[in-house]
Image (spheres, coloured by chain):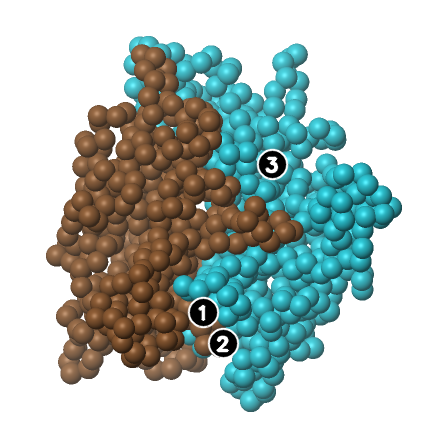
Chain colours: A brown, B cyan
Amino acid sequence: MSDSNLMGKITSLAKRRGFVFQSSEIYGGAGSVWDFGPLGNELKRNVKEQWWNSMVHRRDDVEGLDSSILMNPKVWEASGHLDGFTDPLVECSNCHRRFRTDTPGVDEDQCPTCGKTEVFGDPRMFNLMFKTFMGPVEDEASTVFLRPETAQGAYVNFINVHNSARQKVPFGIAQIGKAFRNEITPGNFIFRTREFEQMEMQFFVEPGTDDEWFEYWLSARLEWSHSLGIAEKKLRVHEHGKDELAHYAKKAVDIEYEFPFGWQEFEGVHSRTDFDLKRHQEHSGKRLEYIDPAGNKRFLPYVVETAVGVERTVLIALLDAYTEENVDGVERVFLSLDPRIAPTKVAVFPLMKKEGLPELADGLYEDLRNAAIPSFCDMSGSIGRRYRRQDEAGTPWCVTVDKQTLEDGTVTIRDRDSLNQERIAMEMVCKWVSDHLLKV
Amino acid sequence: MSDSNLMGKITSLAKRRGFVFQSSEIYGGAGSVWDFGPLGNELKRNVKEQWWNSMVHRRDDVEGLDSSILMNPKVWEASGHLDGFTDPLVECSNCHRRFRTDTPGVDEDQCPTCGKTEVFGDPRMFNLMFKTFMGPVEDEASTVFLRPETAQGAYVNFINVHNSARQKVPFGIAQIGKAFRNEITPGNFIFRTREFEQMEMQFFVEPGTDDEWFEYWLSARLEWSHSLGIAEKKLRVHEHGKDELAHYAKKAVDIEYEFPFGWQEFEGVHSRTDFDLKRHQEHSGKRLEYIDPAGNKRFLPYVVETAVGVERTVLIALLDAYTEENVDGVERVFLSLDPRIAPTKVAVFPLMKKEGLPELADGLYEDLRNAAIPSFCDMSGSIGRRYRRQDEAGTPWCVTVDKQTLEDGTVTIRDRDSLNQERIAMEMVCKWVSDHLLKV
């Protein structure tokens, strides 16, 4: 849909239905940090599971890793983040607020906060890493950082993973985990946040084969976006120009999504060469070379990285699924989420609160839980209202237990998108749902 | 097994097989922080999945949450952590190292590091929370903390979750997530670490029913430990004495495990009363009372908390599963992990590297991957050596493709614990494994 207020609608639905809450909301929030409620957490879990299945479990050449957020600070010296992961900031001499140089107002030397003119001096470099202190003393020597990317965990563990998993180059290391960036201008709801979760994969290849692997992974990642059901016309690729490239990159392509606020990065595919491994080898004094068991080739592998944010994927899934439609003069809003990532798979309603229908619904709900199918039972309110709630939650199937159930043991199962209803035997619901989840 | 060197054996196996590596190992590590390799990460994922299934998906009265690590600092003022989450430390006036007062040597006023005597003054309070700075300026006003427990995320979201999920008290909020404590004496491998992952559930109940719910959850959590296959004789409960109770607790019981270094906490069940909700209500000025829809009762719920660490559960699973046995004069080491948490479910071996056996094995391996069954194919080394590797990885089933496979399409499937082998049709392996995983 094209709707300038779509972000507002999504933010409001997200809070109302329990997808996303402002962190520490009762205290007025925390700077651009968000909490995921019951439905948002399940959506996140499902997105991560889809990624993990496609990147690790269904492949024979990618290993999983879960490295720590706090690392030895020398990692960030070697990676170049300590020197290079910075934004230039200027400070207002009147109100002392700091800004990026590209902030509107600042370019005309007029403070966006206090309005004074000619208040800015030369920009100073500001590191985006969060720093903290480990151990009993707060000093320079105990300073450590919250990782700004998970990738370095894969690089410093390259030899450990290669040896223990007995993988041969080319192979990859995949990781899902939190990263932190002290962004000056976070925003657009969960699009850019200071605390976020990354799904990154570092693919180690023989130098000279990196361009080919870059194309392979770019197309594999595009396919993944499509497999989540995201509209193809909302996706495009954008190659970074020389001035946009990060300090470690030889080549970088963003898969972009058309957000209500414009085309922006969804996922990045980066050709990082041997930049990181070489720097870690130099700084640690440890050999990080790969030795080919057959030909006795010895080389520092080149790296092709794929990197996508969990929260950003969740935002895209919500935006892309948001649908308003008018059915016989009645407005309805629903999230057409792919059933595999939908938080609740089935909702069960007794049509009325009598004649044993609630007990029957409860029994079915219990069967679904025992089969570990995320489900919900809604006993109260008009049936129309109960449908509307599940539509907004993106629940693909609603099952209603009615009078006919008492007679022949069948229930109606209603499809969220088509509104089609069919009757099936109540005892077949678990199997019907499992089968449909596999088919999608 | 009773073995004073068991911790050393587990640490070494964990590194060799890719369960656990020291964080930033090539730089000499980071203070008691660990990375989980391919197998360790899968073991962690499986432990978390078992917990989530039993605490959320299979229940109708517990909702999931994923709240942030960085929160508004007022949360920690209200929770009492800013004032109360401290350890008393003394500093050596000679070498300036700091110690807990119960450190051996310190109690006799003799520095454990430099050996000097009469060097300690009065202890000073040292807060265990990691602090960092959010926003562009490093000052008092921008100081935030890495959460030392996930619980507070559930308390500040109590009303949001209650409203959006339409749950009635009693109900719970479950969360899995990282927490950080700047421990002075971390140690025992992954038993006590500065960065760790918690699985916590806060159950909100009507005051007066909290003792009953406490007993319910203590027994439910004990049952969960048993369901992971942990030896019952290694588990016991220990109730905290008055002097052991945390500042928020009315009653606390630890489920303890007998580690090689003694009986220590595995999981904690805590009766936290309305301590946290009351403090958050006072500090935020927001009503956090629950209003019963039926009787118009209005109260601040009491809380029963269950809290267990992911890494600690992984350590217990490894220790408990570690087995050495002598079969016909040959030593073998295996991990008798419950198949549901075992990282790799099936390993596939071609008996020889000829006559098309590798291709057959590869085909089976591909079928397993397509069914998203974590598996491994090992082509090289003697068959005995390949078995030993999988035994150490805790892989419950090894499938060998041999000459008979060419004739009748059957393979042998070998049980890790009993060493029994049976022949089944190769095309039935995926189903056989899925069925056995459900049965366990």
Find the distance from the CA under tag 3 to the CA under tag 1: 39 Å
Amino acid tagged 3: Leu
Callouts 3 and 1 close, C-beta under 8 Å: no
Callouts 2 and 1 close, C-beta under 8 Å: yes
Q: Chain of mark 1?
A: A
Instruction: Tell me, yes or no, whether dots 2 and 1 are on the same chain.
Output: yes
Closest to the observer: A195 or A334? A195
* Occupied quadrant, residue A4: bottom left
The quadrant the N terminus of chain A occupies is: bottom left
Instruction: Tell me, yes or no, whether dots 2 and 3 are on the same chain.
Output: no
Q: Residues within 10 Å of mark 2 (few under 14, many from 20)?
A: some
Tell me the tag on residue B31. Answer: none
| Residue bearing mark 2 | A27
Is disc 3 placed on a helix, strand or loop? helix
Q: Residues within 10 Å of mark 3 (few under 14, many from 20)?
A: many
Is disc 1 placed on a helix, strand or loop? loop
Q: Residues within 10 Å of mark 1 (few under 14, many from 20)?
A: some
Give the percent coordinates (x, y) of residue B37: 48, 36
Amino acid tagged 1: Ala
* Occupied quadrant, residue B401: top left
| Residue bearing mark 1 | A30
Taking the image as shown, residue A142 lies to the left or right of residue A231, namely: right
